[in-house]
Image: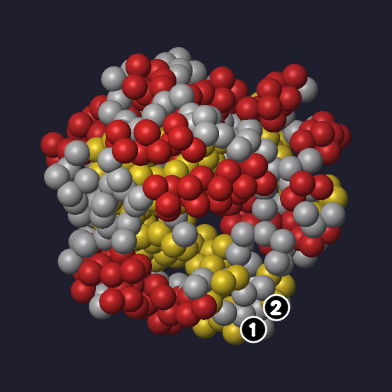
Amino acid sequence: MFKKVLIANRGEIAVRVMNACKKLGVRTVAVYSQADEGALHVQMADEAYPIGPPPVAQSYLNMDKILQVALEAEAQAIHPGYGLLAENAIFARKCAEKGLVFVGPKAESIEAMGFKVKARKIMKEAGVPIVPGNIEGIQGLDMAKGLARGIGYPVMVKASAGGGGIGMQVARNDKELEQALKMCETRAKAYFGDPSLYLEKYIEEPRHIEVQVLGDEGGHIIYLNERECSIQRRHQKVIEEAPSTFVNPELREKMGTVALRAAQAIGYTNAGTVEFLVDPDRNFYFLEMNTRIQVEHPVTEMTTGIDLVKWQLRIAAGESLTLKQEDIGINGHAIECRIYAEDPDKNFMPSPGKITKWRVPKLEGFRADVGVYEGYTVSPFYDPLLAKFVSWGSTRDQAIEIMNGALEATKVEGIKTNIPFHMRAIGSGLFKEGRTTTNFIDQLKEE
């Protein structure tokens, strides 16, 4: 095992990785921007180093500075968390060039899945079902219109290099398609430096269901069941659960087998997630593969008893995966609510500011992965995720009851949070009945 690991991230995921490191007896190195000098991950680390001004381009995305700190601190490995540099093949290669272990898959695997059009092509060749659409990208409006009519409206315009729900827009006719192309191209260029787009068939009222995979350097790879991640705002997840109420044992095995096929097609190692869209008839289609740890990994941990971050570190250190597919069961039910500094009554607008009160309960069957504290100032520079609340029960109803109790008992002042939204969502008939499609939030408003 490594003696020292640098965590190239911030917030709750940096804290989560540090907790796993401490359990393994590994010393931790934090990096921080000027805005994060007083952050929780900085306080928790064994060592902490400044890396630049608040904007991520000058700090958390500054590869050379982060690598310099890692070498000076004599770290042996870098854990990228999620977001930021986690799916950056260039960074993974630079780590290897400096003699540092990148805690994640090989750069080639990241590259293969990072460009969505390329990923669709690889998956199609591997026999993985993909959402009907084009593979080669769009060359002009006329081509886009011809493709859309061939696929059949409605269609989804997507950024080829996209992720996190950015650069996506539904079009139901030629006029909307033209507007969507302009908007997505602008956003794709601004966020990813790549304006290329492609089209997919827009599946009405699908479920967003993903399968966790874990593989070692020896080629042994397993899947750890599914997570339901359909409740989203602006194409970004806010509530997740495991297992899915919609997935039966037959579908679970089919999706798991396909997820393994997808991972094996790119020689995948470490923790990753294959995401699918599932239609009302239980047909499923490859959406993308996230080559990193997911925000929602705790629901898998709670229902399998497997610490995914510890396994990430162990695999990166060269250990073989001792888990076998037949060892992976499902114990109870888990629900995760992402707690954001945002106002759900104002279209989930961010709500930065100083947290004047922060009280999170300690309850049986409840886990809180937290990245803030009372007195901490939430910065406008970064994603407003404060914490992840995870409940576990022997049944789904029990998990809902525990989550409701935790949300009600939590006290936050000084900023707005989306806790009121979670209380409405978890308490709704829609959720209790398991009717959690990607249209959930619109349907909740109607309800």
Image quadrant holding the C terminus, namely bottom left
Disc 1, SS: loop
Depth check: give the residue in front, 1 or 266.
266
Which residue is tagged 1?
414
Query: In the rendering, at what x and y percent does residue 358 appear?
Result: 59, 78
Nearest the camera: 237 or 37? Answer: 237
Query: What mark, if any, has residue 21 been given in the picture?
Result: none
Of mark 1 and mark 2, the one earlier in the sequence is: 2
Q: Which residue is identified by label 2?
A: 354
| Whole-percent x, y for residue 57 in the image | 77, 46
**Contact (CB < 8 A) between labels 1 and 2?**
yes
Q: Residue at x 35, y 38 (%)?
A: 148
Left or right side of 447 for 147: right
Return the residue nearer the eye: 113 or 398: 113
| Tag 2: amino acid | Lys
Image coloring type: secondary structure
Mark 1 residue type: Gly
Q: Is residue 415 visible?
A: yes
Compared to residue 129, the image places residue 346 above or below, namely below
Residue positioned 52% across, 83% down in the render: 411
| Left or right placement of residue 66 versus residue 388 in this view | right
Q: Residues within 10 Å of mark 1 (few under 14, many from 20)?
A: some
